[in-house]
Amino acid sequence: MRIFSLVLLVLVLGLGGANWVLQGPLPLDFEITRLLQTVVDARSVWIDGLSQTAGWPLIVVSTLVAGLFAASLARLPGAAALIGGVILAMASERLLRLAIDVPRPSAELVEVAKASASSGLPSTFAIFYGAACGGLILLARRKRGREAMSVQVVAWALLVIGCAGRVAAGAHWTSQVVASAALGALAAILAARLAGLQTRGARR
């Protein structure tokens, strides 16, 4: 888990730092967005609907639902770890938005479903889902059985599909989404450790 945490930290500092310094898309950001937009409509209803689950007030409902699954996997400590991870992630998101400002994709470069003047880094959606889905994946890895496997599959699917949708909508560059999701996952790992849960893939 230490190696995985280090990889996540490298993604946060490397991609996030480069995006902040360059104030624009990194190599392959533009190409990935254009590729996704050839197969996904930037204005797809499902992208907007899923995005709203990471915004106020639905983010509270999303966190509670994830917390219920966490409690099923690891009882009260699991729920506490997941909710704590989300709180840490969203606190980091607020602090970063006060400290940095990085441009989002522009309509001159790619299709943009909804224009926004807010910073493209961090991505609120990616950092929230990185923490919530990352927390569930960590807890599920500690157990065997269909429930644990199902939780992992659904959590990975929501994280990947949701982040890809944000990129396809022209809301963020891929580097911004990956760095944000990695930061959210780091918050989930930290919260799990603070809650006293083993996160090295130990299974019961």
Image (cartoon, rainbow, N blue to C red):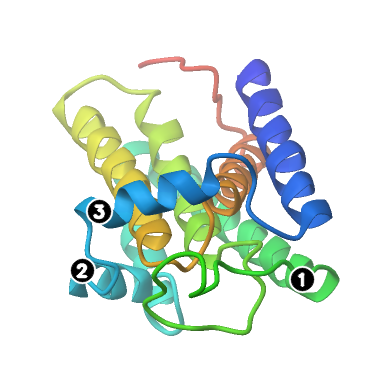
Q: Earlier in the sequence, mark 3 or mark 1?
A: 3
**CA distance separating discs 3 and 1:** 29 Å
User: Where 195 sits versus 54, above or below?
Assistant: above
Q: Check residue 46 in the rendering and tell me which mark sits there, or answer none.
A: 2
Please provide percent x and percent y for residue 27. 61, 40
Give the residue at mark 3: 38
Report the Cα–Cα distance between label 3 and label 2. Answer: 16 Å
SS category of the residue bearing label 2: helix
Residue at figure coordinates x 49%, y 83% from the top left: 115
Give the position of the C terminus as an image quadrant: top left
Q: Is residue 115 visible?
A: yes
Dividing the image into 4 quarters, which one contains the N terminus?
top right
Q: Earlier in the sequence, mark 3 or mark 2?
A: 3
Looking at the image, residue 55 sits to the left or right of residue 157; the answer is: right
Give x and y (percent) for residue 50.
29, 68
Q: Is residue 152 above or below residue 173?
A: above
Q: Earlier in the sequence, mark 1 or mark 2?
A: 2
- Identified by mark 1, the residue type is Asp
The amino acid sitting under disc 3 is Thr
Crowding near pointer 3: few (<14 within 10 Å), some, many (20+)? few
Q: Position of residue 37 (x, y in %)?
A: 30, 57
From the viewer's side, name the closer residue of 85 and 113.
Answer: 113
Instruction: Name the residue that disc number 1 marks.
Output: 101
Measured along the vertical axis of the image, is residue 188 above or below residue 177?
A: above
- The structure residue drawn at horizontal position 44% and vertical position 66%, both measured from the top left corner, is 170
